[in-house]
Amino acid sequence: MTQWKKLLKTLGFTDSEAIIYLTSIELGPAPVQDLARRAKVSRVTTYAVIESLSERGLMSSLEKGKKKLFVAESPERLVSFVHGRVREMEATLKEVESTLNELRLMQNGEKPVVKLFEGKEALKAILDDVVETKPKHIDEFGNLDEIIRLNPRNELDPYYKKLDQNKTYTRGFLLAKEEEIVPGRSTHDIRALPVDEFDFKGDVFVYGSKVALSTFRGKQISILIESQDIADTIRAMFDLMAKGMKK
């Protein structure tokens, strides 16, 4: 019985389920009290185990006179149960394999967090997050003319002042026609992109472990991605641009 008990436990049986099933195989049809006494398990536990095994098709009951007896199904039924478990495990294996990349992203808590903002307040939601995060360094690549067209200077200036108060250093590559791109800022390194060579309607912010992507063509949309690996990758692109472009 010991060997069979170990085998049943490998199939997911609990100790009580294994011993009561094997005891029922030995006794044949028997009342609960006899099963409990022979298996040395409490009557309450025996009832619970009988219900659990019955749901799996491994035990059933019958009436004999005024007594209700319980009996384990034939060993062949156990084989069918094992085949069913194998099919379930095969299906589980396929599901695990199909979602393995998602599991890798979750490893060490590195699954990116993505937020979507739409409408006129989309960019402001990003700027609010930048100010709240209080990063020491910001990288930006964007069309400043489009930003100002949609967000007047008097609405942007409070953000710039807060960044100055937080002593946030900003490195930017901005498409703009204005000579003084970010007036009044003492902690910035801004490089102007020639408007006759570039034409895009978006913006990229990198700060801390976050990357913000915005589009200003049609409906404004901003996407905020929180991932240290993605932020480090985009920041490396800024480092490369900085080396190849004069102020």
Image (cartoon, rainbow, N blue to C red):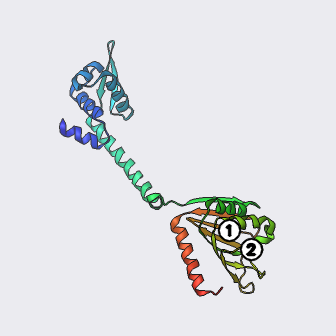
Q: What's the mark number on residue 164?
A: 1
Q: Do the residues labelled 2 and 1 touch (CB within 8 Å)?
A: yes
Label 2 sits on residue: 184
Alpha carbon of mark 2 to alpha carbon of mark 1: how far?
9 Å
Q: Where is residue 155 in the image (x, y as percent from the top left)?
A: 79, 64
Of residues 170 and 199, the one drawn nearer to the viewer in this rendering: 170
Residue 19 in the image: above or below residue 218: above
| Quarter in which the C terminus is drawn | bottom right
Q: Where is residue 243 in the image (x, y as percent from the top left)?
A: 57, 85
Q: At 33% across and 33% down in the image, what residue appears?
A: 58
Q: What's the mark number on residue 179?
A: none
Judge from the rendering whether residue 21 lies leftward or rightward of residue 179; answer left or right: left
Residue 110 in the image: above or below residue 39: below
Quadrant in which residue 4 is drawn: top left
Judge the density around disc 1: few (<14), some (14-19), many (≥20) Cα neighbours within 10 Å: some
Q: Is residue 31 visible?
A: no
Q: Where is residue 20 in the image (x, y as percent from the top left)?
A: 27, 29
What is the three-letter code of the residue carrying label 1? Asp
What is the three-letter code of the residue carrying label 2? Gly
Q: Can residue 170 be seen in this view?
A: yes
Of residues 3 and 240, the one drawn nearer to the viewer in this rendering: 240
Residue 27 in the image: above or below residue 119: above
Quadrant in which residue 211 is drawn: bottom right
